[in-house]
Amino acid sequence: MATIAKTPSATWKAIIRKRGWPTTIKTFRTKRDAQDWARRTEDEMVRGVYIDRASADRLLLKKAIDRYLNEVSSTKKASTASAERHKAKALKAALGSYSLGAITPDLVAEYRDKRLNEGKSASTVRLELSLLSHMFTIAIKEWRVGLFYNPVANIRQPKGVTDD
């Protein structure tokens, strides 16, 4: 059973201590939200499907891209690494202030459409989305960021003139 406590700042803190799982804490504006989250989270723990999303909610996209450029792109051919640094600038400018957990397929599709409307070629946008997708894949598989899926995988890629 979770512990729900009122904090001095008039918010509600839910604390879940369950054997075999790390202590999980989250703060909410209302007691009802804290209770609902605690009930859902405990249920996921019992079923063995709980994924701690705290790291995904704390890590901003611009920091994740920087880490990707340092750890992954730096191992690639110099021209490829340079091209990825250039593509990353547009991604960081548009989506950099979002946490990884807040990036949805809708947001990525909106970015894709905006870049195409700015006159960028379908190939350029496809390469930017490819970089973003690979960064999410690395974050999920290697960095163990608490994400369920890669949001880029759930959108349509832009079609070029020769792709029809």
Image (spheres, rainbow, N blue to C red):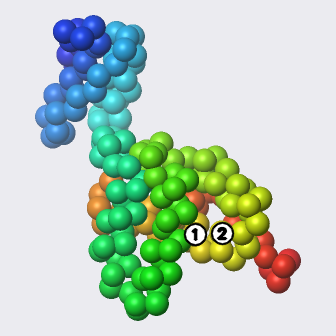
The numbered mark at residue 9 is: none
- Give the residue displayed 50% in from the left and 81% down from the top: 83
Quarter of the image for the C terminus: give it: bottom right
- Give the residue displayed 32% in from the left and 65% down from the top: 67
In-image side of 148 versus 161 (left or right): left
Quarter of the image for the N terminus: give it: top left
Q: Is residue 145 above or below residue 8?
A: below
Pick whichever, 37 or 63, lies toward us: 63
Q: Are marks 1 and 2 in contact (CB under 8 Å)?
A: yes
Q: Residues within 10 Å of mark 2 (few under 14, many from 20)?
A: many
In-image side of 94 versus 3 (left or right): right
Pick whichever, 136 or 16, lies toward us: 136
Pick whichever, 92 or 156, lies toward us: 92
Q: Amino acid at mark 2?
A: Val
Residue 24 in view of the camera: yes
Q: Amino acid at mark 1?
A: Glu
Q: Residues within 10 Å of mark 1 (few under 14, many from 20)?
A: many
x%, y% of residue 113? 72, 56
x%, y% of residue 103? 51, 47
Pick whichever, 125 or 137, lies toward us: 125
x%, y% of residue 55? 30, 46
Task: Tell me the SS state at disc 2.
Answer: helix
Pointer 1: what residue? Answer: 128
**Number of numbered discs overlaid on the protein picture:** 2
Task: Tell me the SS state at disc 1.
Answer: helix
x%, y% of residue 22? 17, 39
In-image side of 40 versus 83 (left or right): left
Pointer 2: what residue? Answer: 125
Q: Residue furthest left?
A: 19
Q: Is residue 59 above or below residue 79?
A: above
- Give the residue displayed 40% in from the left and 56% down from the top: 62
Residue 69 image-quadrant placement: bottom left
